[in-house]
Image (spheres, rainbow, N blue to C red):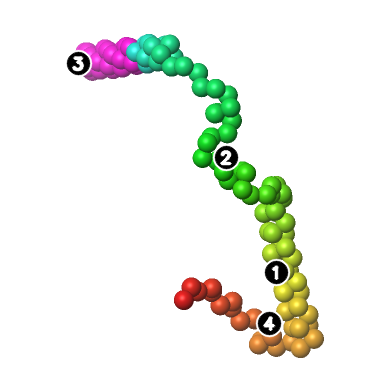
Amino acid sequence: MEATIVFVLLLGFLLGGLTLILYAGYQSTEQARARQELEHSADTVPAPEVAVEMPGFFAPLAIDRPPVSPFAFDDALLAALETHVKAEQAIVRQFVRYPSIDSLYRPGRQELRVH
């Protein structure tokens, strides 16, 4: 019984000591990081806002191309969905008029290939 109590106390002190060491290491790392940030922030010169707003390598693209509608992708996606739904409705209409296994399943689309 006494051996168990001594063993539990020993493990408690060991675990507490290790936790204390980890916490002290974490605090020293955070202090070093804060010190480095303070040193680097004093050394750097703030960049002009124009350079931050528009990087130089984007400028030729913005000038050469006409402005694109922000809804161009949405419109293309909507057109593709409408085309798909119309094709499905045509298949269903054909199956309703002439019910058979062959008219129920349409042949799969051929994949686009680059030759």
Query: Residue pushed farthest left?
Result: 3
Tell me which numbered mark, 3 or 2, is placed earlier along the sequence.
3
> In this orientation, which residue lies closer to the viewer: 15 or 64?
64
Residue at x 66%, y 87% (from the top left corner): 102
Q: Is residue 40 left or right of residue 86?
A: left
Residue receiving disc 2: 59
Q: At label 2, which amino acid type do we have?
A: Ala
Q: Position of residue 6 (x, y in %)?
A: 22, 13
Of callouts 3 and 1, the N-terminal one: 3
Q: Position of residue 69 (x, y in %)?
A: 71, 49
Looking at the image, is 112 positioned above or below residue 51? below
Q: CA distance from mark 1 to mark 2?
A: 39 Å
Q: Amino acid at mark 3?
A: Ala
Residue 22 position, x and y percent, is: 31, 17
In the rendered structure, find residue 104 and report the number of the disc placed on it. Answer: 4
Callout 3 crowding tier (Cα within 10 Å): few <14, some 14–19, many ≥20: few
Is the residue under label 1 in contact with that under label 4 (CB below 8 Å)?
A: no
State the SS at label 2: helix
Q: Which mark is residue 3?
A: 3
Q: Which residues are magenta?
A: 1-30
